[in-house]
Amino acid sequence: MLPDLPPNYIPHQVLAEQHLTFRWDDWKASEDFQHDASALLEATAGITPRGRIALTIGLYEWVIWRLRFASTDPAPFQIAEAAWCATVDRRYMAHYEFDRHAWIGPVRGPLWCAMTWLVPAVLLSDDSPEELESGLSYLTKLAHHVVDDQAALDAWTSVTLGRFRRLYPATPDGPFDDLFGERQEERRGPLLPREILDPSFSFEPDMTNQLIDEFLRTVDFNANPFLKSPELLVAEGFSGVPYRLQPS
């Protein structure tokens, strides 16, 4: 099932655009990208990994909502829901790779690219930081390629980056920190809710736990094939109650 309500931060004019004005060739799509992502990568270098992941998901959502009018496939939106769960704990989300040949054309092609670059950025970047760098860079360029109102996208990015830099500055790891990978969730930085991406939402950090728990309680894991069931999570060693915010 497709979601009815888009994120508040995606403007109406982006959602209302029902013409594909961008060039698309499935076999060389990125060659047509014009946007330079280097400034954004530099600007995000000083924020937490979890903050960079959240921004990557936000850029992904700009892409999938821009194309919602032309696609009835729920998978891109299910991936978004699973990715937000994975910002709380990456074990919630199941790793998945999509068949390239089932996702071609000027609508499904960009959606395939978006999902293909988002999933490893969310799930694999703790051990492979280059996956997050690649996902953030690619989805920045892809969003600028498919979204007509680039001024609105840039304005949102600027405000959101300012909020991240203020609230979630990165803390560099020491050379001997977490040698055995036992504190990966902690090393991602403080938890943050989806509302951090909404400039119209008067967010304060002390709202975090309530907002995240409210979100997790709305998740229908039975309807999302990219989310693990509570039974599977417990079998894999998940402690606490799945799809509830765990006590700190």
Image (tube, rainbow, N blue to C red):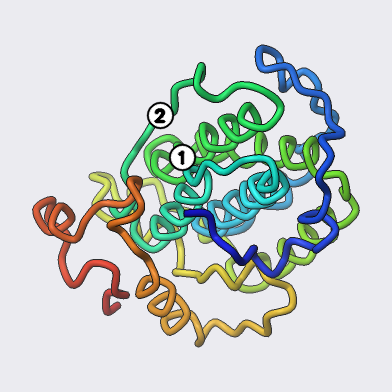
Q: Residues within 10 Å of mark 1 (few under 14, many from 20)?
A: many
- Front disc: 2 or 1: 2
Q: Nearer the viewer, residue 78 or 236?
A: 78
- Residue drawn at x 46%, y 63% as measured from the top left: 189
Q: Report whether 195 appears left or right of 146.
A: left
- Residue drawn at x 66%, y 47% as measured from the top left: 68
Residue 166 visible: yes
Quadrant in which residue 247 is drawn: bottom left
- Residue designated by label 1: 119
- Residue designated by label 2: 97
Q: Residue 111 location in percent, x, y?
A: 60, 35
- Looking at the rendered structure, the kind of residue marked 1 is Val
Marks 2/1 in contact by CB < 8 Å: the verdict is: yes
- Residue drawn at x 76%, y 57% as measured from the top left: 157
Residue 177 visible: no
Q: Above or below — where is 104 with respect to 207? A: above
- Residue drawn at x 74%, y 46% as measured from the top left: 40
- Looking at the rendered structure, the kind of residue marked 2 is Glu
Distance Cα–Cα, label 2 vs label 1: 8 Å
The tag earlier along the polypeptide, 2 or 1, is: 2
